[in-house]
C-alpha cells in the first residue's frame, strides 16, 4: 500500500494542482483558469486537502470586499516522492502512479502544443528524448546525486524578470540484465 504522502501527491487532480503551483504562487481563481475542466468545488476540496496535509502553504492573504483571498504555493519547491514513499508502494501502486504521472505530463505537453504557433515548435526550447545509458552502480549513484543537486537548485529558483517557466520531467528505469 502506498504511503499516505504518495497517495496525496499521486492523485490525478492534486498532481495537476501541484504542477501548476510549481515555482509560483496562485489563487484558487487563477488555478481555476489554468485547470478549466475542474469544477470549482472539486478544485477547492483538493486545495484544502493539500493545504491540510502540508503540501501547499498560504503564500499571501488579501482582503477583497470583506473576503480574504488566499494565494497558495508549494510548501517545498522540490516536491518529490522520497525513497521510503516508493518502497511502500506495491507493483500496482507503481503502475497507477506512473499512469497518473504520464497522463499529467501528456496534458501539460498537449496544452503547450495547442497554444504555440507551428513555427515556434522547433525553437529548441521544447525537448524530449529517450535513450539508454550504461553505468555502474557507483556511477549511477554519483549521477543521481549530481542530478538531485542540479534539479534542487532549479526547483528552488523563484520567478524573476527574464525567467520563463519550464516543466522538467524525468524518468529513470533500470533494465533487467539479460544475456545477449
Image (cartoon, grey):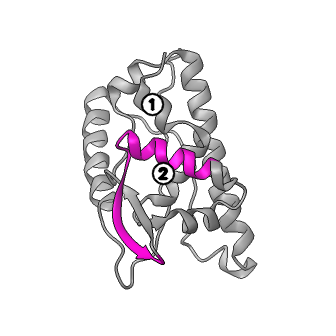
Q: Which disc, if any, is residue 72? A: none
Can residue 171 be seen in this snapshot?
A: yes
Residue 68 painted magenta: no
Mark 1, secondary structure of its residue: helix
Mark 2 crowd level (few <14, some 14–19, many ≥20, 10 Å Cα):
many
The percent coordinates of residue 75 (x first, y second) are 32, 51
Which of the two labelled residues, at mark 2 and mark 1, occupies the earlier sequence position? Answer: 1
Residue denoted by label 1: 6
Horizontal arrangement in the rendering, residue 39 relative to residue 46 (left or right): right
Tell me: residue 37, above or below residue 69: above
Query: Which segment is the magenta one?
Result: 42-65
The percent coordinates of residue 15 (x first, y second) are 53, 45
Residue 52 painted magenta: yes
Residue shown at 46% from the left, 77% from the top: 64
**Callout 2 touching callout 1 (CB < 8 Å):** no
Asked whether 44 or 82 is in front, the reply is 44
Residue shown at 41% from the left, 35% from the top: 134
Residue shown at 32% from the left, 61% from the top: 154
The percent coordinates of residue 5 (x first, y second) are 41, 31
Q: Quadrant of the C terminus?
A: top right
Tell me: residue 55, above or below residue 119: above
Horizontal arrangement in the rendering, residue 18 relative to residue 103 (left or right): left
Tell me: residue 137, above or below residue 172: above
Separation of disc 2 and disc 1 at Cα?
Answer: 13 Å
Asked whether 111 or 37 is in front, the reply is 37
Asked whether 85 or 4 is in front, the reply is 4
Task: State the image quarter where residue 128 is shown.
Answer: bottom right
Residue denoted by label 2: 18
Amino acid at each position: 500500500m502506498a504511503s499516505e504522502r504518495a497517495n496525496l501527491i499521486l492523485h490525478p487532480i492534486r498532481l495537476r494542482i501541484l504542477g501548476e503551483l510549481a515555482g509560483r504562487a496562485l489563487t484558487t481563481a487563477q488555478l481555476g483558469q489554468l485547470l478549466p475542466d475542474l469544477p470549482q468545488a472539486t478544485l477547492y476540496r483538493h486545495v484544502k486537502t493539500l493545504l491540510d496535509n502540508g503540501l501547499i502553504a498560504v503564500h499571501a492573504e488579501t482582503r477583497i470586499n470583506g473576503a480574504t483571498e488566499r494565494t497558495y504555493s508549494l510548501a517545498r519547491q522540490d516536491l518529490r516522492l522520497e525513497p521510503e514513499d516508493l518502497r511502500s508502494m506495491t507493483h500496482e501502486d507503481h503502475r497507477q502512479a506512473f499512469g497518473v504521472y504520464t497522463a499529467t505530463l501528456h496534458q501539460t505537453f498537449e496544452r503547450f502544443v495547442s497554444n504555440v504557433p507551428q513555427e515556434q515548435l522547433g525553437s529548441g526550447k521544447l525537448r524530449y528524448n529517450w535513450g539508454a545509458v550504461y553505468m555502474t552502480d557507483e556511477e549511477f549513484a554519483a549521477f543521481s546525486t549530481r542530478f538531485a543537486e542540479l534539479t534542487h537548485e532549479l526547483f528552488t529558483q523563484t520567478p524573476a524578470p527574464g525567467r520563463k517557466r519550464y516543466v522538467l520531467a524525468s524518468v529513470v528505469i533500470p533494465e533487467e540484465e539479460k544475456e545477449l
